[in-house]
Image: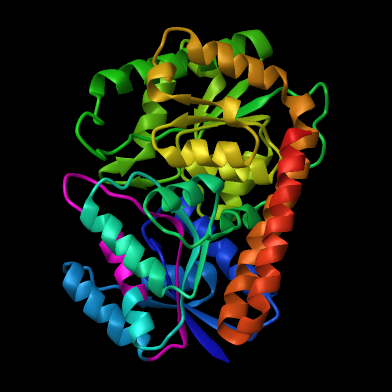
């Protein structure tokens, strides 16, 4: 039995990250290798209970203490998997996020423990110190997989000569397509909004957020009036300082047809969130994983692009035209027109989404096989990497159809 330490942003009450972990664990259980995963979590008891996995705590008393703590932990395990999710990015005016996540991989290689980046996402990296850590950590990693071509491009632009394996977000494995919709069924629209945090000068724009929320509420009114839609607003995270429930209530309050809108409590598990999404005919989200769960369930979605990862996933799913930047979303009438069109096309979009969902799910499963091969059978990695390229070619065909 090989023991693999999995490091990600787990145990923080974020449905997207918990869906990532659920998908990783599922793919590892299916992979043909005897691996025991141990998850580093900020809430080990909750992670162990929810995911039925061994979990250990993370020491967050500063980056150096955290690194020493994880280095000591690595001595007891056979390998390290960093991810999944959008861990490669800079927040604020100083580097820090990249260093905290990637330096343990450097330590693992020094300890002669294989380290991988598991379905990593790359967003804005603005500091040269961060770029240097990324290049160094990449050179030490035994295996690098990314969840979309956008992240692969971003790594190339950061100076990595090594080509990562392009797979898919593990959260795709937590939900399946629902049965065909009935023509007479009243359309249900699920909305997963959030506030966005500062990633640099000029990003926190209260005026823009105000306009966007007003336009979103107006667009939902249009869906109610023109297509008889019911609206459900769903928090994907509800913690002090990052409370989607507040945003959901604010959007509902701004609607003229609030009688057709419900603000739901945050789902208890990723699977419960997936069931809500799968019963919808359209998902509108600022939360990335609301869009990912929608694609897994073959439900049309529309993304509000507050970070590059929204666009990267939409491109991956062949839905690049179903996103809007925040400036666009704040323009009068823009969202109303776009959302009305997507909901009206829902039946025509579904067959393509079913094909796309199938290929993306196979790529997400392949990520587990790749990690298992890195730990148990490294000779299989070239063949599995070639398989990933074949599936990506199939995905291009599915998105173009």
Residue 212: image x %, image y %?
38, 19
> Which quarter of the rendering shows the C terminus?
top right
Q: Quadrant of residue 198?
A: top left
> Which quarter of the rendering shows the N terminus?
bottom right
Q: Is residue 61 above or below residue 391?
A: below
Q: Nearer the viewer, residue 294 or 7?
A: 7
Q: Nearer the viewer, residue 312 or 32?
A: 312
Look at 57% across and 25% down and name the residue there. 231
Residue extending farthest front = 161
Residue 240: image x %, image y %?
26, 46
Look at 41% across and 11% down and name the residue there. 331
Look at 65% across and 21% down and name the residue there. 342
Residue 376: image x %, image y %?
61, 86
Residue stretch in magenta: 76-105
Q: Is residue 305 above or below residue 290?
A: above
285 inside magenta stretch: no
Residue 173: image x %, image y %?
65, 57
> Total of numbered circles in the picture?
0
Question: Is 233 situated left or right of 168 in this image?
Answer: left
């Amino acid at each position: 039995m090989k023991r693999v330490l999995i490091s990600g942003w787990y145990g923080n009450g974020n449905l997207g990250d918990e869906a990532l972990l659920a998908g990783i664990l599922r793919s590892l259980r299916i992979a043909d290798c005897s691996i025991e995963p141990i998850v580093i979590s900020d809430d080990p008891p909750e992670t162990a209970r929810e995911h039925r996995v061994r979990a250990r705590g993370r020491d967050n008393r500063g980056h150096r203490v955290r690194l020493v703590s994880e280095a000591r932990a690595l001595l007891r395990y056979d390998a390290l998997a960093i991810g999944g999710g959008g861990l490669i990015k800079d927040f604020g005016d100083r580097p820090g996020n990249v260093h905290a996540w990637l330096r343990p991989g450097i330590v693992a290689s020094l300890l002669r423990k294989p380290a991988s980046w598991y379905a990593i996402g790359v967003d804005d990296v603005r500091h040269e110190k961060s770029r240097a850590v990324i290049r160094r950590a990449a050179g030490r990693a035994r295996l690098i997989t990314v969840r979309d071509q956008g992240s692969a491009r971003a790594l190339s632009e950061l100076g990595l000569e090594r080509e990562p394996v392009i797979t898919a977000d593990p959260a795709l494995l937590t939900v399946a397509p629902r049965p065909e919709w009935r023509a007479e069924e009243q359309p249900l629209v699920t909305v997963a909004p959030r506030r966005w945090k500062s990633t640099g000068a000029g990003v926190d724009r209260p005026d823009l957020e105000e306009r966007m929320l007003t336009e979103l509420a107006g667009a939902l009114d249009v869906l109610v009036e023109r297509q008889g839609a019911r609206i459900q607003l769903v928090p994907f995270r509800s913690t002090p300082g990052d409370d989607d429930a507040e945003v959901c209530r604010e959007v509902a309050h701004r609607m003229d047809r609030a009688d057709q809108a419900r603000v739901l409590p945050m789902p208890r598990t990723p699977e419960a969130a997936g069931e809500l999404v799968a019963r919808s005919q359209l998902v509108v989200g600022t939360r990335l994983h609301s869009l990912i769960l929608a694609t897994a369930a073959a439900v049309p979605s529309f993304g509000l692009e507050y970070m590059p990862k929204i666009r990267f996933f939409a491109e991956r799913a062949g839905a690049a035209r179903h996103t809007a930047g925040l400036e666009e979303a704040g323009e009068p009438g823009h969202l109303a027109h776009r959302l009305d069109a997507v909901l009206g096309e829902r039946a025509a979009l579904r067959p393509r989404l079913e094909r796309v969902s199938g290929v993306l799910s196979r790529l997400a499963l392949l990520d587990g096989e790749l990690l298992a091969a890195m730990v148990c059978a490294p000779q299989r990695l070239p063949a599995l990497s070639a398989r990933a390229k074949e599936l990506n070619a199939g995905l291009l065909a599915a998105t173009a159809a």
